[in-house]
Amino acid sequence: MNILFDSVIQLEASPKQVWEMLTEDVNLADWQNGVTKATLVTGSAGYRGAKYELLAENISKTVVVEIKRSRPEERLQQHFKLGDCNYQQFFYLSRVDDETTQLVYHCKQEPASAWRKILNIKPSIPAFVKPAILESLASRLVQGSAAA
């Protein structure tokens, strides 16, 4: 599996607020770049086994994201398949103080097709896994706290 991204960001929000943004389907399309709609289809939001359907720009099929591991307000690991690639996203949260959370983000990609390896063709990377989502998340959290 290829590591695509390793990023760290400090967010002006509590781990609980960050967790809700990461796991509640009503929030996912607000901060994940390129996602137009997110729906929880099975399981409990934020817990192992939960599945979300994402509608994303420039992707003709619905993307099904499954939570593989979770520890509320601490760790979230999700998996999805897009085309012939498997993706894993990891979010690690740690409290800096009452209103600041550090978020560590890792994203891995595994191209499943051998022909890609032979021809050295790299698959495209969807916008909703790129590190820019972290800045979008930070911005959304600031907007949410200003509205409260």
Image (spheres, rainbow, N blue to C red):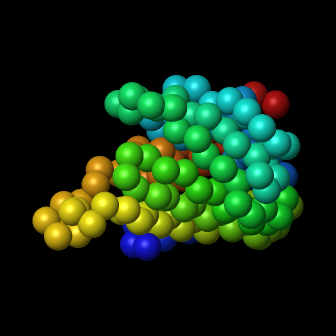
**In the figure, residue 146 lies in which quadrant?**
top right
Q: Is residue 22 above or below residue 48?
A: above
- Give me the residue at 70% from left, 54% from top: 67
Q: Quadrant of the N terminus?
A: bottom left
Q: Nearer the viewer, residue 35 or 115?
A: 115
- Give me the residue at 59% from left, 56% from top: 79
Percent across and percent down for residue 147 are: 75, 28
- Give me the residue at 13% from left, 65% from top: 119
- Give me the residue at 36% from left, 62% from top: 111
- Please indicate, yes or no, whether residue 14 appears anywhere in the rendered image: no
- Please indicate, yes or no, whether residue 117 appears anywhere in the rendered image: yes
Percent across and percent down for residue 103 are: 65, 64
Q: Is residue 28 above or below residue 13?
A: above
Q: Quadrant of the C terminus?
A: top right
Question: Residue lying furthest front in this view?
Answer: 114
Question: Residue lying furthest left in this view?
Answer: 119
Percent across and percent down for residue 51 are: 70, 43
Q: How many marks?
A: 0
Percent across and percent down for residue 110 are: 41, 65
Q: Nearer the viewer, residue 127 or 122?
A: 122
Q: Nearer the viewer, residue 94 or 43?
A: 43
Q: Nearer the viewer, residue 119 or 147?
A: 119
